[in-house]
């Protein structure tokens, strides 16, 4: 499975996701629930697994569903092309 691209992060810590992505987020160990702002969130506060770059609110990022890794735009695009 290719890494999943998210168009915009909600914050540096988490991004709200729909129910369709909850299984992937659980498998990746990144699902967060129980917040007043919404029901399901993808946690990405550890930044890019390759370079450590933080995910910034409003910026795109990737989730590698096979490894559970968060990737910045550059490394996510590279992994998709592999």
Image: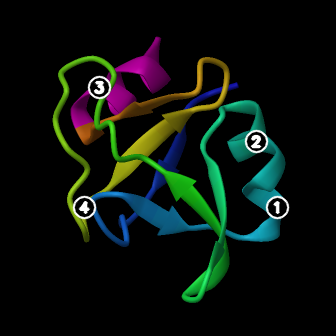
Q: Position of residue 28 (x, y in %)?
A: 66, 32
Sooner in the amino-acid sequence: mark 3 or mark 4 = 4
* Distance Cα–Cα, label 3 vs label 4: 14 Å
Is 82 in front, or is 9?
Answer: 9
Judging by the rendered image, the residue that carries numbered circle 4 is 59
Q: Looking at the image, which residue is at 66% across and 35% down?
A: 29
Q: Is residue 6 above or below residue 70?
A: below
Which comes before the other along the chain, label 1 or label 2?
1
> Residue 60's quadrant in the figure?
bottom left
At horizontal 47% and vertical 65% (from top left) the residue drawn is: 15
Task: Give the camera-side residue of 82 and 23.
Answer: 23
Report the side of 49 relative to 80 (left or right).
left
Q: Which residues are magenta?
A: 74-82
Left or right: 23 in relation to 10:
right
Distance between mark 4 and mark 2 Cα atoms: 23 Å
User: Quick one: label 3 or label 2, which is nearer the N terminus?
Assistant: 2
Q: Give the dominant element type of the magenta stretch: helix, strand or loop.
A: helix
Residue reaching furthest to the bottom: 36
* Tag 1–tag 2 contact (CB < 8 Å): no
Q: Residue 36, how many percent across, how many down?
A: 59, 88
Give the CA distance from mark 3 to mark 2.
22 Å
């Amino acid at each position: 499975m290719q890494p999943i691209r998210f168009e915009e992060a909600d914050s540096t810590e988490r991004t709200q996701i729909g129910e369709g992505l909850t299984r992937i987020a659980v498998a990746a160990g990144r699902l967060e629930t129980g917040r007043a702002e919404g029901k399901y969130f993808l946690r990405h506060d550890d930044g890019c697994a390759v370079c450590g770059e933080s995910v910034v609110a409003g910026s795109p990022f990737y989730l590698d569903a096979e490894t559970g890794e968060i990737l910045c735009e550059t490394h996510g695009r590279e992994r998709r092309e592999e």
